[in-house]
Each structure stands twice: as structure tokens, then as C-alpha cells.
Amino acid sequence: MVRILILVAFLSVVLTGCVSPELQVEEANPIEAVPINNELKDYIRVDPGSYYIGSDDGVLDKRYFAGKLVEAPLSISNYYSVPRTISIHYTVPTDVGEGYSFPPVNAVDWVTFPTPEIEVPPNSISKIMVVLEMPEGEESPPFWEFWTTVKDMSQSGMVQIEYNIRWRVEMKD
């Protein structure tokens, strides 16, 4: 039974964290929640699984350069019948996409979260904002990647799931 639960948890991370759908960036308020109906229960979903910033293929700002501020929402879907506390923080990647570099050391200071922890009501979707602002005069590789980690703080037990969201940045002057 434990092996089945671990397999289901692994598949939910793989299947929900790897999709990067086209989306419209909208104002996100982490306090407002949208109800959802779904037959599947007892899991958290984070969308999208990756963002492209400054890329012609991306959905966020076709040009990114030092001094520019970018804000983007992550949708957190709570398919549990109870509220879940969700946290988000900056993470240095363990690997990066082909053609991308690891983030500059100072990038940890450039990525902020106006609300680093939210409570998502049962069977609803809330948004959490991520802000990237690289100060003017800072330097970085032309293509670099950082991650944000989303965690359900309501989890208990030895195995706990975290969702790593890829943020790929293409610098343009």
C-alpha cells in the first residue's frame, strides 16, 4: 500500500509539474480563492511547471534586462477537503536546461515573494506571486535558470512532496 501511495505521489509531481501552458498574466490576489470541482481528491497541483522570461517563446515580457521588474502568479490547486498551508521559496537548481547557466550568486536577492505562505481553502485554487527584479548594474549569463520550490506545509510523515518550478531567463538589452 505504501509503495502505491509513493508511486501516486511521484506521478502527480511528474504529471503536474512538467506542463508549461500558454497563459494570460493577470492580477493575482492570494486571498481570493476560486472553487474547483474534481473527482480526484487529496492532492496539490501547481501551474505552470515552468516560466520563460525574456524569450520570444515565453509568455512573460519579451525583453528582460537588469533593472526590470517581472511579476508572475503561480496557481495552487487544493484538491483536499481541508485547507492547506502552502509555502514558496527560492531554490538554486540542481540541473539546468540545455543552453542555460546556473543563476548568479546574487539571484537569491532578486527573487521575492510578497506572500511567501498562503492558506488555500478546500477544493479551490489560489495564486501566489513571484517577483523577479535584477538591480541595474548587476550582471548575469545571457541565459540562466532559477527555481522556486512550492511545499504543502500541512504534510506529515517521512515522505513530503515539494514542487520545483523552473524559471528560465533570457537577458536582452
Image (cartoon, rainbow, N blue to C red):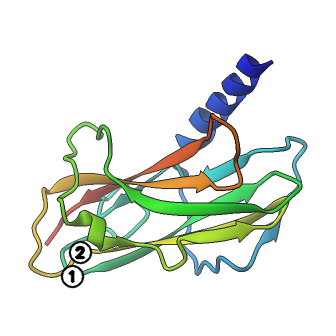
Asked whether the beta carbons under mark 2 and mark 1 sit within 8 Å of each other, the answer is yes
Q: Nearer the viewer, residue 24 or 153?
A: 153
Q: Quadrant of the C terminus?
A: bottom left
The residue that disc 2 covers is 134
Mark sitting earlier along the chain (2/1)? 1
Question: In the image, residue 143 lies at what x, y percent?
Answer: 20, 53
Q: Is residue 172 left or right of residue 27?
A: left
Q: Quadrant of residue 76?
A: bottom right
Q: Nearer the viewer, residue 31 or 25?
A: 31
Residue drawn at x 13%, y 56% is 141
Residue 8 tag number: none
In the image, what residue occupies the spot 75% across and 21% down? 2
Q: Residue at x 31, y 51 (%)?
A: 92
Q: Residue at x 17, y 67 (%)?
A: 172
**Residue 81 relative to residue 18: left or right:** right
User: Eyeballing the image, is 69 above or below 100?
Assistant: below
State how far apart marks 2 and 1 are (Cα): 5 Å
Q: Is residue 160 above or below residue 78?
A: above
The amino acid type found where label 1 is placed reads Gly
Q: Which residue is mark 1?
A: 67
